[in-house]
Amino acid sequence: MHLIVTEKNIAARRIAAILAPKSPKKERVSGVDVYRYELGKGKSRQETAVVGLSGHIVGIDFQKEYNNWQKVDARALIDAEITTTPINRKIVTALRTLGKEADRVTIATDYDREGELIGVEALNIIKKVNPEVPFDRVRYSAITPKAIDAAFTNPTSVDFDLADAGHSRQVIDLVWGAALTRYISLAAGRLGKMFLSVGRVQSPTLSLVVDREKERNIFVPTPYWEIHVELETKAGETFSAQHSTRRFLDKEEATAVFKKLGKKAELKEIEKGTKSDLPPTPFNTTGFISAANSIGLSPANAMRIAESLYTNGYISYPRTDNTVYPETLDLRAQIEIFTEGPFKEFADALLEKAELVPTRGKKETTDHPPIYPASLAKESELKEEEWKVYELVVRRFFATFAGPSTWETMRLRLEINAEEFRANGARLLEPGWRWYYPYNVPEDRLFPELSEGEILKVIKKEMLDKETQPPGRYGQGRLINIMEELGLGTKATRHEIISKLYSRAYIHGNPVQPTNTSFAVVETLEKYSPTITKPDMTKLLEENMDLIAEGKIKEDTVLEESREMLQQVFSELDKNRDKIIESLQAGLREDKIIGNCSLCGNELMIRRSKRGSRFIGCSNYPNCTFSLPLPKSGQIVVTDKQCETHGLHHIRIINAGKRPWDLGCPQCNFIEWQKTQKEKQAQQPKKEKPKTIKDIEGVGKATAGKLEEAGITSVEALAEADPIELAKTIKTSVKKVKTWQISCNGGIVEDL
DNA sequence: GCAAGGTC
């Protein structure tokens, strides 16, 4: 049997359909889809089975003994043995079963570095059960009959050097990431769910966000002034113009000019011109994400939707770097799909063209074609956001074949008492591609009918006080674009890296804002392990991977060098351990400050009770016992937004895989909660106030005895006792005492 | 419980 292995199930299904003389039979081998067909007859009969993987089916990790963060020193991970283990048991089992049967294997994974490694991983599993089996490799850039037939008639050989290059990346990422994550987390005392992660891609990305925030913090705004006038023609039409000194840095100068302005403006010059903007290039993942982001979808959401459109056959594969349609793609046929349905008029218009010449982007790769619509969808069969994304992909695809959009521009030069004013206008002449792709269209700025030398009436003049703004925070789409420019991450991982920074509570909000913890982590790493915070680490890695792929250097040599570098980093870290602990913990402390206590004015902080539950407490404790509750689970992020009533910072709760919960001001939130509790109680029949201590729910004989020893003999005395002191004296929890006190009060929760 | 890269 001839076994063909692809990177994913969908590729297996489509390749089998192309190669099989009649439709292939779908079978299941240990729960995995396998497509079988036969070529030829009699003696020359050749059975074929095509199976799809699910990306990497094995992964690398340290051995179990290294799992204990407290017992195993971070540095020990650098030279620890690394093992390869299955991460997808079902597929590994299926490969073993099929591998035994095979008399020939063809690796048909994606045509890129990771694809080569994934293919070798599969090959290694097959060779364990069938060591002598011959194998080859096919490379294709699109799954079309033409491309697949061509690839399979000219198979090549597996590139083990390229796979080694990919493997070196895995090892370096694991060793650096795991060792530094463990070191920083231990130094900060953040273990368990709260660990502080470090990585080749995430740390430089986080550092971009932190650097931008630092620029904003040191930014000193400079005041400036603008002068605008509103003008009126004889016919009574109005438009506005601005002084040709756009920004006056000197207020006196601006005021002098402003005072000079009279009631008449002379139109000195009208300059007409045309400009055109070129149609956009085909969508790759980054281009798609940023377009989706500009219509209000987060990168993670846009990718999730694209993924589902792809699995349902509406759009092509959404993870691609390519911005050039491959020759094998029949573009005309793809447009003809839309000659019915809601995009009919657009498709018809394109098909009228004698020649379809698409735009080309800068990146041309072999892995997959750019994203294009694969089939016709009905609006009714998609969810609202899915339709939004689908329509975006369809319109973008159309736009890449359309002509430029042209504008008529008009620039006016005016004079008011010898002061020069200017006004710019533009009118869309020919919509071109913008008709197909009507997103983010600049508006027409039109002037009334005007002629040179015309005198206009100044009906309003104003001088505006303004100040220069700090550089803006990055939006998620912008961040993904910068990551691509810097070579950080891949098309499939960039949005995941950003999601990771959110779920680790390193960043919050949109545009993206770092927490104080991030400042502390980035500063520590920049000082003692600068390599990991810079895109250069990825660049160096890419260079080394190229050398490995070209056979100029061995993988082991690269790994050895990398480990040596990390040893040096750890020497620095160990030398400065005390300083690192101090600065990390100072940063972490700042993220715990909520504001000032309304009772005593000291700092309110996020604290932990002895039993581990979190609450907001006063730093003046035990002198001040003010406290507010916090949710049991989720990461707590203190945002920079403050409550107008209480002055406390708003709080956001982050749970992995869930939407963040904006709790708002913790004091307002608690007051609200009390209100609803009271309403609930009001609806319930009121409980009678207990008469003696023993009547209180949860107080037995033994407790009553202890309370008596502590001098509490009546219900009233218990209600008024200090819960913290009392809890200490009778050795119970504060929470218990407080519930008794609520019972003393007939079940009513006291106000703050 | 640690990374980043595949895929779903």
Image (spheres, rainbow, N blue to C red):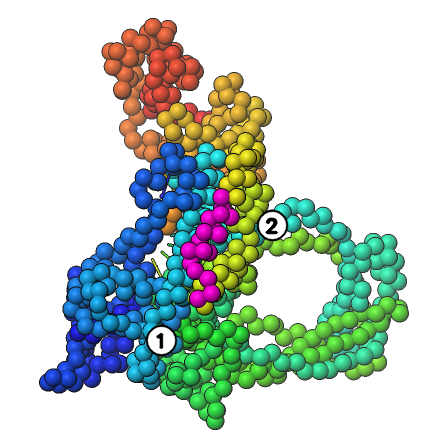
Q: Secondary structure at mark 1?
A: loop
Task: Decide which of A157, A74 is in the foreground and name it.
Answer: A157
User: Label 2: which residue?
Assistant: A211
**Magenta extent:** A551-567
Is residue A693 shown left or right of residue A720? left
Name the element at disc 2. Answer: helix
Relative to the observer, which residue lies in front, A76 or A626? Answer: A76
Three-letter code for the amino acid on which mark 1 is drawn: Arg
Q: Which mark is residue A94?
A: none
Quarter of image, res A460: bottom right
Residue pointed to by mark 1 = A139
**Residue A688 percent location from the top left of the image:** 29, 20
Residue at left 37%, top 50%? A657
Q: CA distance from mark 1 to mark 2?
A: 42 Å
Q: Identify whether A639 is placed above or below A557.
A: above
Most extreme residue toward the bottom is A354
Residue type, label 2: Asp
The prevailing secondary structure element of the residues shown in magenta is: helix
Task: Give above or below for A352 relative to A319.
Answer: below
Q: Chain of mark 1?
A: A
Label 1 close to label 2 by CB (< 8 Å): no
